Amino acid sequence: MSRSYITLSKEGSGTYVEKRSEFIGYAKPVSTEQECIDYIEKIKGMNKGARHNVYAYIVNEDGQVVSRYSDDGEPQGTGGIPVLDVLRKQDITNAVIVVTRYFGGVLLGAAGLVRAYGKAASLAVADAGLCRMVLCQPVSVTVEYTFYGKLQNALADKMAQAPVFGENVTVTYIVEEDEVDKVVNIVNEVTNGKNYLSLGEKEYYPVT
């Protein structure tokens, strides 16, 4: 598994007008190729009167990177590739972009189409924003109340879920994969080994 990757923070959109043709870009973070296909069909369904629905996506599913695009009837290389380039140039993975074109009656030529599709895609990505996803592992620690404050101070720079208070205190830290051993050592040192510690499944988490 890759240690980290860049993707979209959320779904986004943006509109660009070129000689009365309206280009509407839609962008969304995804996890699977099927999500890409479903999103493309959704956008097509929302824009049944549009002349073209150009798309591109890059998705890493189970270690297999899939990259696809479609000009959807536009001259070859004028739609899908400019949209795909927006993803590639920013090293964005696990994302799909669809750009819908409503024809304005004026032909744009190859250069105009490349510019318009790329611009609409870029606007959608800018609206969605970017985030870095990092492979992390949850580290759950249960300690007596006497150690809780010390533990919080020692791991203040780590992402943590809301503590669970009961007879003891349980805190789950979201730790980057290569720092798990370090965190475990800190926990044992702070609590003098008086803790119950468990490791969760590795997952990707957004890291600012």
Image (cartoon, rainbow, N blue to C red):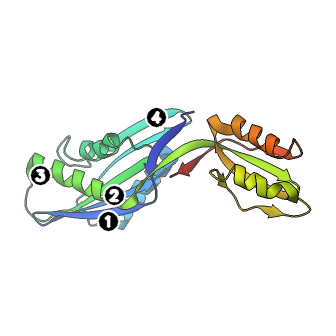
The span from disc 1 to disc 2 (Cα, nearest Å) is: 22 Å
The residue located at (80%, 62%) in the rendering is 164
Q: Nearer the viewer, mark 1 or mark 3?
A: 3
| Residue under pointer 4 | 65
Q: Nearer the viewer, mark 1 or mark 4?
A: 4
The tag on residue 47 is 1
Kindly check if marks 4 and 2 are in contact, taking CB atoms under 8 A apart as contact.
no
Kindly check if marks 1 and 3 are in contact, taking CB atoms under 8 A apart as contact.
no
Of callouts 2 and 3, which one flags the residue occurring earlier in the amino acid sequence?
A: 3
Q: Nearer the viewer, mark 1 or mark 2?
A: 2
The picture places residue 181, in percent across and down from the top left corner, at 71, 35
Dot 4 amino acid type: Val
The span from disc 1 to disc 3 (Cα, nearest Å) is: 22 Å
Q: Can residue 126 be seen by looking at this rendering?
A: yes
Between 11 and 75, the one lying in front of the other is 11
Between 56 and 153, the one lying in front of the other is 153
| Residue under pointer 3 | 112
The span from disc 2 to disc 3 (Cα, nearest Å) is: 21 Å
| Quadrant holding the N terminus | top right
| Residue under pointer 2 | 126
| Label 3 secondary element | helix
